[in-house]
Image (cartoon, rainbow, N blue to C red):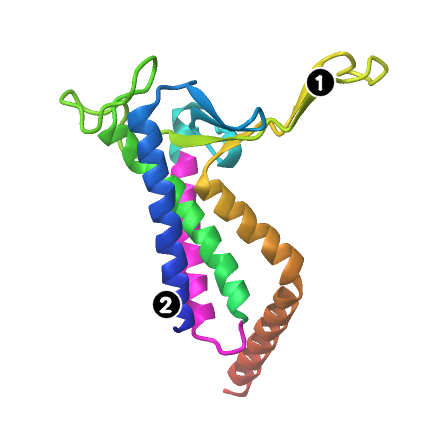
């Protein structure tokens, strides 16, 4: 199997799993509903967000449009970069896998933002309907991202002597996320941990290529 085939397989697998789970959540649960998978520390908890991974958001209508367009441009850039990488024999398969995970995760969340508002009714107090007769809950690029994985591993209160937050409740891990978020996070952290030296090599090659182009231009 070629690097390109492996990359496509990873992207398709992540997207299928991500979208199937989101569709199931959207058509079987209402916002805020949850159930335990393993005790009190692994919970399926249905939330939606307007913004980035792990529930972080850009406020307002224009913030939402900007974020959606930024995602699309970023995905196009990552896709172009990935196509260049798979053509090279000196790029490790593991690095291709990491970039493929990042791309798949980004596309997965773009699908929610772009289309879910058009094909689903809202989930406030009831299970959403797919392709409702009256239309969806939002227009193109204004859909909300479906999140469901919740791991409240540790909870308690900050000691009273801690400045600012003393006595307040703390919870780890608070963000709710999805398969696409997980793919992005795994891809990015794997690149940082295992392949950071590769960027130095690529930057060096880029500098040499630029210098050679300048010399050729000067000779002409």
Range shown magenta = 66-91
Q: Is residue 42 above or below residue 189?
A: above
Which residue is outermost to the front?
Answer: 39
Query: On the rendered structure, is 167 left or right of 97?
Result: right
> Mark 2 and 1 residues: CB-CB less than 8 Å, in contact?
no
Binning the other alpha carbons within 10 Å of mark 1 as few (below 14), some (14 to 19) or many (20 upward) gives: few
Alpha-carbon distance for marks 2 and 1? Answer: 47 Å
Q: Quadrant of residue 215?
A: bottom right
In the image shown, does 109 or 159 lie closer to the viewer?
A: 159
Q: Position of residue 185 (x, y in %)?
A: 55, 46
Element under disc 2? helix
| Dot 1: element | strand
Which residue is at a point 43% across and 43% down the rendered structure image? Answer: 70
Image mark for residue 211: none
Between tags 2 and 1, which lies in front?
1
Residue 17 appears in the figure: yes
Name the residue carrying label 1.
156
Q: Is residue 68 magenta?
A: yes
């Amino acid at each position: 199997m070629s690097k390109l085939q492996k990359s496509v397989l990873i992207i398709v697998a992540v997207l299928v799993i991500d979208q199937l789970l989101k569709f199931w959540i959207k058509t079987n649960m209402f916002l805020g509903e949850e159930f335990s998978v393993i005790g009190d520390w692994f919970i399926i908890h249905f939330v939606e967000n307007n913004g980035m991974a792990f529930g972080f958001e850009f406020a307002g209508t224009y913030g939402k449009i900007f974020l959606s367009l930024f995602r699309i441009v970023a995905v196009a850039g990552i896709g172009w970069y990935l196509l260049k990488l798979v053509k090279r024999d000196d790029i490790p398969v593991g690095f291709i896998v990491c970039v493929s995970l990042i791309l798949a995760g980004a596309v997965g969340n773009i699908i929610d933002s772009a289309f879910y508002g058009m094909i689903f009714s809202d989930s406030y107090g009831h299970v959403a309907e797919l392709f409702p007769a009256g239309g969806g809950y939002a227009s193109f690029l204004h859909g909300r991202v479906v999140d469901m994985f919740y791991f409240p591993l540790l909870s308690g209160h900050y000691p009273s002597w801690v400045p600012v937050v003393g006595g307040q409740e703390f919870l780890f891990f608070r963000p709710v996320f999805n398969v696409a978020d997980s793919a992005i996070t795994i891809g990015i952290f794997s690149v940082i941990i295992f392949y950071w030296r590769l960027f130095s090599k690529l930057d060096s090659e880029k500098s040499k290529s630029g210098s050679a182009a300048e010399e050729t231009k000067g000779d002409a």
